[in-house]
Image (tube, rainbow, N blue to C red):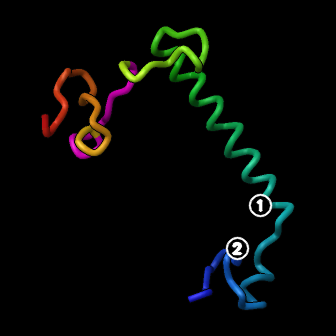
Amino acid sequence: EGNDPAGITTQDPNLMARFDPIDGGRRLRNYLRVMSLEVQTIARACGKNHVLNLEPEDLCALTIEAAAMAGVPLAGTSWIPGR
């Protein structure tokens, strides 16, 4: 309880000292920027000119487990596990 090693959700002063909010903000900004670029790349790979043009039919999963959990076809097939 309260021993988050990153120091984000802890009440322990020693662990809290590890968390640098400025650095954390930079890392979050970078993560979101990269995720945005990844989604744009995926949209282009699906033949879409904008992320907003992606549709549920564009989704597929790379593993049987992911396909079953998400209810989408396994990549390269029209098979949805469990249906």
The kind of secondary structure element at disc 1 is helix
Q: Amino acid at mark 1?
A: Gly
User: Left or right of 80: which side holds 54?
Assistant: right
> Any magenta on residue 63?
yes
User: Left or right of 57: which side holds 33?
Assistant: right
Q: Which residue is mark 1?
A: 24
Which residue range is magenta in the image? 58-66
**Considering only vertical position in the picture, is 48 above or below 55?**
above
Instruction: Check residue 44 in the rendering and tell me which mark sits there, or answer none.
Output: none
Q: Which residue is mark 2?
A: 8
Residue at image location 26% in from the left, 40% down from the top: 63
> Any magenta on residue 29?
no
User: Left or right of 79: which side holds 40?
Assistant: right
**Considering only vertical position in the picture, is 47 above or below 41?**
above
Number of numbered markers: 2
The image quadrant where one finds the N terminus is bottom right
> How far apart are the alpha carbons under marks 1 and 2?
10 Å
Q: Quadrant of residue 51?
A: top right
Residue at image location 38% in from the left, 26% down from the top: 59
Residue at image location 60% in from the left, 23% down from the top: 40
Residue 78 locus on image (x, y percent): 20, 21
Disc with the residue nearer the chain's start (1 vs 2): 2
Residue 83 locus on image (x, y percent): 13, 34
Q: Amino acid at mark 2?
A: Ile
Residue at image location 24% in from the left, 46% down from the top: 65
Q: Residues within 10 Å of mark 2 (few under 14, many from 20)?
A: some
Mark 1–mark 2 CB contact (< 8 Å): yes
Mark 1 or 2: in front is: 2
**Considering only vertical position in the picture, is 9 above or below 74?**
below
Residue 37 locus on image (x, y percent): 64, 29
